[in-house]
């Protein structure tokens, strides 16, 4: 299996709907004051390398589990639904197709680099309080080298240990 490095927060199938005759889309960016427009293929825009990677995982496939096990399957199913919506607009969707489309639309809210940074910030700065029962369960489950309390697990762990890679 090929391990993806390029993680599209704007899926290629979704961008292709706006492709021009030369199979490119217009990509806009504003590095300073001016807005720049550039023709790019859907493959070459709307992505960040290793956006969903978990660098602390032990092997390359595990590091890319969010892309491989979540994002790719969501996008693949949504692409099928989008194709049906375009090819046979009056045909009713099945419950599974409706669910796949809804899951895709919701994923579009949470998969952008800015949203991932926002979520990471919220996780890192949340004031964690754990009940006595949760404290006891943590003590039973924690590895020997893990922080002593669940609070310290969140406050003392490095960003790489807690977050999806957003840079």
Image (cartoon, rainbow, N blue to C red):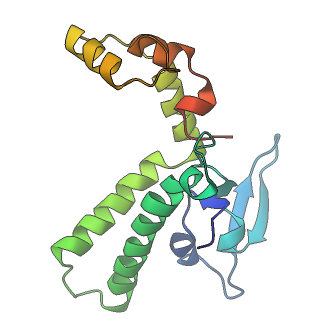
Q: Is residue 46 visible?
A: no
138 or 102: nearer the viewer: 138
The C terminus, quarter of image: top right
Above or below, 70 relative to 129 = below
Q: Is residue 50 left or right of residue 124?
A: right
10 or 159: nearer the viewer: 159
Q: Is residue 31 visible?
A: yes
Check the image and name the residue furthest to the bottom. 87
Q: Is residue 2 left or right of residue 147?
A: right
The N terminus, quarter of image: bottom right
Residue shown at 63%/56% (left/top)?
A: 60
Q: How many marks?
A: 0
x and y, in percent, of residue 58 in the image: 60, 46
The part of the image, by quadrant, that contains residue 85 is bottom left
x and y, in percent, of residue 98 in the image: 23, 69
x and y, in percent, of residue 66 in the image: 49, 53
Check the image and name the residue furthest to the front. 144
34 or 12: nearer the viewer: 12
Residue shown at 55%/40% (left/top)?
A: 164
Q: Is residue 95 left or right of residue 143?
A: left
x and y, in percent, of residue 21 in the image: 67, 88
Residue shown at 57%/77% (left/top)?
A: 16
The part of the image, by quadrant, that contains residue 151 is top left
Above or below, 114 relative to 67 = above
């Amino acid at each position: 299996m090929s391990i993806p490095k390029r993680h599209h927060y704007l899926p290629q199938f979704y961008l292709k709907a706006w492709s021009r005759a030369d199979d490119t889309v217009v990509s806009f960016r504003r590095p300073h004051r001016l807005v720049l427009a550039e023709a790019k293929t859907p493959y070459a825009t709307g992505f960040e390398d290793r956006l969903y990677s978990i660098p602390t995982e032990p092997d390359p496939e595990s590091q890319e589990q969010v892309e491989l096990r979540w994002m790719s399957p969501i996008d693949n199913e949504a692409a099928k639904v989008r194709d049906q919506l375009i090819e046979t607009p009056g045909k009713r969707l099945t419950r599974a197709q409706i669910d796949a489309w809804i899951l895709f639309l919701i994923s579009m809210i949470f998969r952008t680099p800015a949203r991932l940074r926002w979520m990471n910030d919220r996780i890192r700065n949340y004031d964690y309080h754990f009940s006595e029962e949760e404290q006891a369960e943590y003590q039973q489950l924690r590895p020997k080298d893990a922080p002593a309390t669940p609070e310290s697990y969140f406050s003392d762990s490095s960003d790489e240990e807690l977050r999806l890679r957003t840079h």
